[in-house]
Amino acid sequence: MVEQMTSVGREQEGESVMLYSAQLHLVNGQHQLLVTDAESGHTDVIPVTKKAVSRLPTYLGMLKKAAK
């Protein structure tokens, strides 16, 4: 089950190019973060605690604030 999906890109001549994508999965009651490098296709699977998952809105808010 995918709970959250985001991607990070960069602009190149007015177009967005995806660099990485991240998906948060719930597998057998455990959260896993899958981060894929779009260029190489390599995917890292990282176990994530429930506490960290609950803090994702805070982390995303910090990133948005820093980007301004």
Image (cartoon, grey):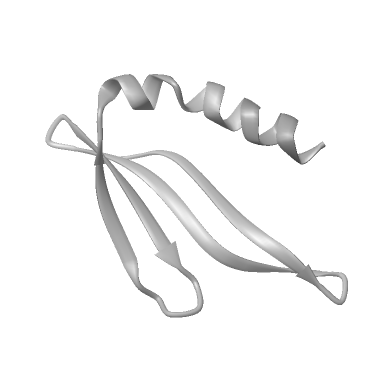
In the image, taking residue 27 as reference, residue 7 lies left or right, namely right
User: Measured along the vertical axis of the image, is residue 18 above or below residue 23?
Assistant: below
Q: Based on the displayed image, in which of its 4 quarters is residue 58 positioned?
A: top right
Q: Residue 31 or 64: which is nearer the viewer?
A: 64
Residue at the left extreme, as displayed:
28
Residue 65, image x, y percentages: 73, 29
Taking the spot 25% from the left edge, 28% from the top edge, the residue there is 49
Q: Is 23 rendered above or below residue 20?
A: above
- Image quarter in which the N terminus is found: top left
Taking the spot 54% from the left edge, 47% from the top edge, the residue there is 6
Residue that sits furthest to the right in the current view = 14
**64 left or right of 5 in image:** right
Look at the picture and state if 66 lies above or below 5: above
**How far across and down, in percent of the image, does residue 68 sit?**
82, 36
Left or right of residue 35, residue 48 in this image: left
Q: Tell me where residue 52 appears, x and y as whole percent.
A: 35, 26
The residue positioned 40% from the left and 76% from the top of the image is 41
Q: Which residue is drawn at 52% across and 62% down?
A: 20
Residue 29 in the image: above or below residue 11: above
| Residue 66, image x, y percentages | 72, 35
Residue at the far front in the pictured view: 66
Q: How many labels does the image show?
A: 0
